[in-house]
Amino acid sequence: MPDEIVYFVVISDTHIGPTAVYHRHGHYPLPNAQKLVAVINNLPVKPDFVIHTGDIVTEPNPASYQFAAEVLSQINVPVYYVAGNHDTARDIHRYLLMGPKKDVCDDPDVLSYTFDVKGYRFLVLDARGPDEIDPHGLLSAAQLDLARREAQTEGPPLTVFIHYPVLPMDSTWMDAYMLVINGADLHEALLPARDRLRGVFYGHVHQNMQTLRDGILYAATASAFSQFTAWPNDVVTGFDPDHLPAYSFVHLMPEQTIIHQHTFQRRP
């Protein structure tokens, strides 16, 4: 068991576009990403790393990724990325630098890897499915096998990152469109590691959200520029104009996890 604390920042759903004035849901992603980088670089406690849980860009084209690379490369600690439904693993490999890691798949269209920090273990899963199921996610048999191998009963504290929500969220439209289709299989795969699993962190839902099931914590981080609504009776996508862009600051400790969810002022 490690005796140190790991601090990391979770960011998600930056949705950077191909131009500086690209806007989505009434807001401008690029200036908000720039503001977020400044916020991270000036935190009173320096994180050990930053993890982006996907949808780095809105459309996976060179212009968008070049803007993303220019902005996110200014973060002054190692950065890691998860493939969102708006991303491609191939583009992330091509355009974005990451911290030290071990790739667990030779396929350039799959972004899945592990890394270790101060005795803690981190696993990134790729649940991006075929375009016809978008915006749902789907874990391949190989990704589920990887989760089973990593989620043994014995081992160092384990944290998992994925783009999509794994379990139902009691929101009609989110549950209809946003889930990992075989999320129940992932939950079952993780159960043996529940005593050492520090959390499963995801994005995609543009909301801060927590689910606790069978002793496993699933925690979403809100978007870096625009938030959805997620009320139980929402049957279509709703947007919450009053919620600010956000990020999470996570404390991984030998015996517990602490998640601080912060907002920051939107740039026009």
Image (spheres, helix red, strand yellow):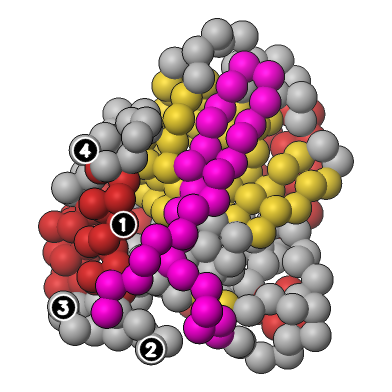
Q: Amino acid at mark 3?
A: Ala
Queried whether the magenta region covers residue 165, the answer comes back as no
Who is closer to the viewer here, 88 or 59?
Answer: 59
Residue 217: give x, y in percent of width and height: 72, 43
> Which class describes the residues within 10 Å of circle 1: few (<14), some (14-19), or many (20+)?
many
Q: Earlier in the sequence, mark 4 or mark 1?
A: 1
In the rendered structure, the answer to whether residue 258 lies left or right of residue 112 reads right
Real-space Cα separation, disc 3 to disc 4, in angstroms: 22 Å
Q: As drawn, is 54 to the left or to the right of 90?
A: right
Residue drawn at the location 74% of the way across and 78% of the way down: 231
Q: CA distance from mark 2 to mark 4?
A: 30 Å
Q: Which residue bears the numbered disc 3?
A: 20
Compute the Cα span from label 1 to label 2. 18 Å
| Residues packed near mark 2 inside 10 Å, few (<14), some (14 to 19) or many (20 plus) | few
Comes first in the chain, label 2 or label 3:
3
Q: CA distance from mark 2 to mark 3?
A: 14 Å
Q: Which residues are magenta?
A: 239-268
- The quadrant the C terminus occupies is bottom left
Q: Earlier in the sequence, mark 1 or mark 2?
A: 2
> Considering only order in the chain, which callout, 4 or 3, is on the residue closer to the N terminus?
3
Helix, strand or loop at label 4? It is: loop
Q: CA distance from mark 1 to mark 3?
A: 16 Å
Residue sitting at 18 percent across and 57 percent down? Answer: 71
Asked if residue 132 is positioned above or below residue 192 in the image, the reply reads: below
Instruction: Please give the name of the residue rendered at 52% of the width and 62% of the height, measured from the top-left corner.
Output: 222
Q: Residues at badges 1 and 2 in contact (C-beta under 8 Å)? A: no
The percent coordinates of residue 14 (x first, y second) are: 36, 66
- For residue 26, the mark is 2
For the N terminus, give its image quadrant: top right
Q: Is 127 displayed left or right of 77 in the figure?
A: right
